[in-house]
Amino acid sequence: MKKLLGVLLCLSLLVPAHAQPPSCDRHFFQKTAPEITRKSLQSNTVALCFEAFAVLHSGVSRTPLWSAEYLTRDSLKAARDIPRADSFHAEPALPPGQGAELADYVRSGFDRGHMAPAADMPTTQAQHESFSLANVVPQNRKNNQILWSAIEGATRHLTNLRGELYVITGPVFEGEKLDRINGRVLVPTHVFKAVLDPATLEAAAWLAPNNDSGEYQVTSIDSLERRIGFKLFPKLPESAKQRAMELPEPRIRHRK
C-alpha cells in the first residue's frame, strides 16, 4: 500500500486539456493544458480557472499540481502598480475535504509558497485569487524567500526581455516516504518553473529541491517531463523540448 501511494503521489499530475474550462485557454501555449502521461495519476483532480492563471489541484496532495500563466510585458507592468495585500484563504470551489485549510499551515514550519506568484498578478482580483491555498504548497522558508523569489524575479526579467512567456510552476513529489503537514498536506520534495517563448519555441525549466540548500538546476522540458510524468507543453515540438534555452541566473538577495 505504501509503495502504491508513493507511486500515486509522484504528483505534478495532470488531466487532459478538455478538463479545463474554455475560458482558460489563454493561459496555455496553443490553448492546450498540460497532459498526464501516467494515467494512474488522475485521481481526485480539479481544474480551476482564475483571472490570470489556471490550476490543476489534487485532492490527494491538497496542493496544486501545476499553476499556468501567460505573462507579457504589459501584464507585468500592470502588476507593478498593485499593492500586495496578503489574503490567504481556503479554496471554496474544491470538494469538501480535498483542499488545504489555513489551520494546516499554522506552526508547520513551512511557508505558504505561491506557485503562480502574487507579484505577477495584474489586477487586485487576480492577486486575491493567487492567495488561494489551491495555488500554494508547503515550501521551505529559506527556499521560498530567497532562491524561489529570485527565480520568480528571473522569470519576470526574461518576460520583459522576450515580450511574452508561457509559464508552468509546480511541485514534485518523489519517493515512497512523503511528509504531510497537519497530517493532511503533502510536502513537495522539489519545485519547478518551466518557461516557453512562443515566438522562438525556446523553453527550459528551473528545478530546485524544497530545502534550504540554495541549489537549483536548469533542465530541458523533455528531461523534466520524463521525471514528473506529464507533458508540460503538449504542442511544443520534441526537438524544442530536448534543447534547454539559456535562462537568466536568479539574483539571490540573502536575508539577514
Image: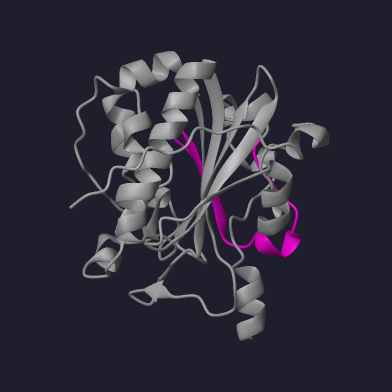
Q: Quadrant of residue 110?
A: bottom left
* For residue 107, side relative to residue 99 (left or right): left
Q: Quadrant of residue 140?
A: bottom left
Q: Which residues are magenta?
A: 33-55
Task: Please say whether residue 31 is visible from this viewpoint.
Answer: no
**Is 118 or 144 nearer to us in this picture?**
144
Residue 24 pos. (x, y %):
55, 30
Residue located 76% across and 32% down the image:
240
**Is 45 or 114 nearer to us in this picture?**
114
* Quadrant that contains the N terminus: bottom right
Task: Please say whether residue 141 is visible from this viewpoint.
Answer: yes
Determine if the magenta segment contains residue 39: yes
Residue 145 pos. (x, y %):
30, 49
* For residue 86, side relative to residue 21 (left or right): left
Q: Is residue 66 above or below residue 235?
A: below
The colour scheme of the drawn protein is one colour
Residue located 30% across and 67% down the image:
104
Residue 157 pos. (x, y %):
43, 25
Residue located 48% across and 63% down the image:
188
Determine if the magenta segment contains residue 57: no
Q: Is residue 183 above or below residue 125?
A: below
Residue 185 pos. (x, y %):
41, 68
Q: Quadrant of residue 37?
A: bottom right
Counting labels gives: 0
Q: Is residue 195 above or below residue 62?
A: above
* For residue 107, side relative to residue 116 (left or right): left
